[in-house]
Image (cartoon, helix red, strand yellow):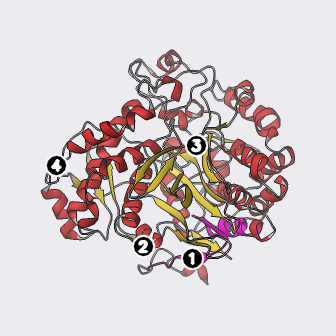
Amino acid sequence: MSHAFDWTRGYASQRSPIFARNVVSTSHPLAAQAGLRMLQAGGNAVDAAITAAAVMTIVEPCSNGLGSDAFCILWDGQALHGLNASGRAPQGWTPDYFRAKYGADAKTPPKRGWDAVTVPGAVSAWAALHQRFGKLPFGDLLAPAIETAERGYAVPVIVQGKWAAAAELPELTQQPGFAEAFLPQGRVPAVGQRFSFPAAARTLRLIADSKGEAFYRGEIAAAAAAHAQAHGGVMREADFNAHQPEWVGTIAQDYRGHALHEIPPNGQGIAALIALGILQHFDIGALPVDGAASQHLQIEAMKLAFADVYRYVAEPAAMRLKPAQMLDAAYLKQRAALIDPKRAQDFGPGHGPQGGTIYLTAADERGMMVSFIQSNYMGFGSGVVVPGYGLSLQNRGHGFTLDPGRDNLVGPGKRPFHTIIPAFLMKDGRPQMSFGVMGGDMQPQGHLQTLVRMLDYRQQPQAACDAPRWRFAGGMVNCELGMPEATVQGLRERGHHVLPFTDSYQDYGAGQFIWRLGDPSVEGYAAASDPRRDGQAAGF
């Protein structure tokens, strides 16, 4: 009688890295295995990533959905490409629109509802990636997601916990369509209980048959716009029609003989680059790996990075300070000089957002590597689900500001500040690792901490992923259980405000990593999947 188990209890386990020539690593095993099936069917890493991403919208609905945004960095075998598939604000969004509706003292667009929804870009990412790089028919790639949505799946432990935490928020459960989609039988599904999503299967079929066109210029767009209008939003079909993903390249920072690549703004990937650019001025590898001295320097570098990122990152055309200026070597050396190894300082950090995101990565034996992330932002996003279509919409609009002095001011057709960031590590012009760490403002912090462990301390990817993390937010430092008590005490002695973590939804992020061992067709890859999720790295 499986239902009598206590699914939440177990013992700390150390995962081993996976070694294979073809790998998919995601935060849900069904998605990893679906992607792997595409590789076995003769598809490439892009095919695998699209399939895994589509399945993830069904099996981890607390973090992403068909109404997500997405970003991707991929190595096609010869070159690195960056794709920004974040959506833009509806034409009806102005600062005056929000002030008239929510009061003159409103600081941002709301957290939930249609007035938090920008045009969702994830489906356009799948279509754009397939059109340029895919091998298998687009319909084949979505077939596993359609089957999973129709037949259902048993809800796993960590997804269920996050689902339950979100369902305690009336601001979510009272949104139109939420309860119908995500509270079947009037409650959150239990661990091991079957959850099916036939409305989403219908939408996935429309997407598959039209290669995404029905989503932006067809039946789905029309249904979303009608639902917005019926519930006080100003999103229109024309806003969906106008959406186009953008191939943007990458921005990079050298560190310890490698180069970390991130998507340029409107995302926060530049925060990880700034922090590494600052850290390279310290001999961090000479300090004990889990000791307070090493963690302190990483925290201070991250604080300096966030101080700039929260002030300046926005829609690229609106940024007064450009990425090249923020990454200028002389400037980063000046910033590094501000760090006191013995004392925590306040560098005027901004306020960090929270997140609900999935990250996945895939690599094949022909050398293609894909780093892909999609997100509904804060848990279930806006909470809005378009009935009959299973279209669960993100709340990226909440990432805008209503402060006219800020570059990230809301405006028609603008893209907001974004937290989700895929990452890619190069060495000597060749791919080394596709990776990411999901979780709001934890993402660049996770990139920094895992890379320092691998490049400064030679920890293998799974160990670097398993290690306890810290998280800086709102002037405080949270330390994960498992961090040595002496380290926590050492951080307090340096003046850090170390507090226990209280947010039941958000945590210390969750990463997926694929490290290239040599010739992919001979040596293959080593892959890791974060134990903080239900996930798996799978390969053959």
Distance of label 1 from label 4 (alpha carbons):
40 Å
1 or 3: mark nearer the eye = 1
Label 1: few (<14), some (14–19) or many (≥20) C-alpha neighbours in 10 Å: some
Q: CA distance from mark 3 to mark 2?
A: 36 Å
Q: Earlier in the sequence, mark 3 or mark 2?
A: 3
Q: Which residue is mark 1?
A: 18
Instruction: Note whether 115 is above or below 469 in the view shown.
Output: above
Q: CA distance from mark 3 to mark 4?
A: 44 Å
- Crowd band around label 4 with a 10 angstrom C-alpha radius: few (<14), some (14–19), many (20+): few
The amino acid type found where label 1 is placed reads: Ile
Residue linked to disc 3: 383
Residue 473 in view of the camera: no
> Which of 367 and 164 lies nearest the eye of the viewer?
367
**Residue behind mark 4:** 340
Ranked by sequence position, the earlier of labels 1 and 3 is 1
Q: Is residue 255 above or below residue 407?
A: below
Q: Is residue 246 magenta?
A: no
Question: Comparing marks 3 and 4, which lies closer to the viewer?
Answer: 4
Give x and y (percent) for residue 163: 54, 57
Q: Which mark is residue 203?
A: none
Of residues 511 and 527, which is closer to you in this image?
527
- Quick one: 325 or 310, which is closer to the camera? 325
**Horizontal side, residue 126 vs residue 527: left or right:** right
Q: Where does the image place residue 277, in percent across and percent down from the top left?
A: 35, 47
Horizontal side of 196 relative to 93 (left or right) equals right
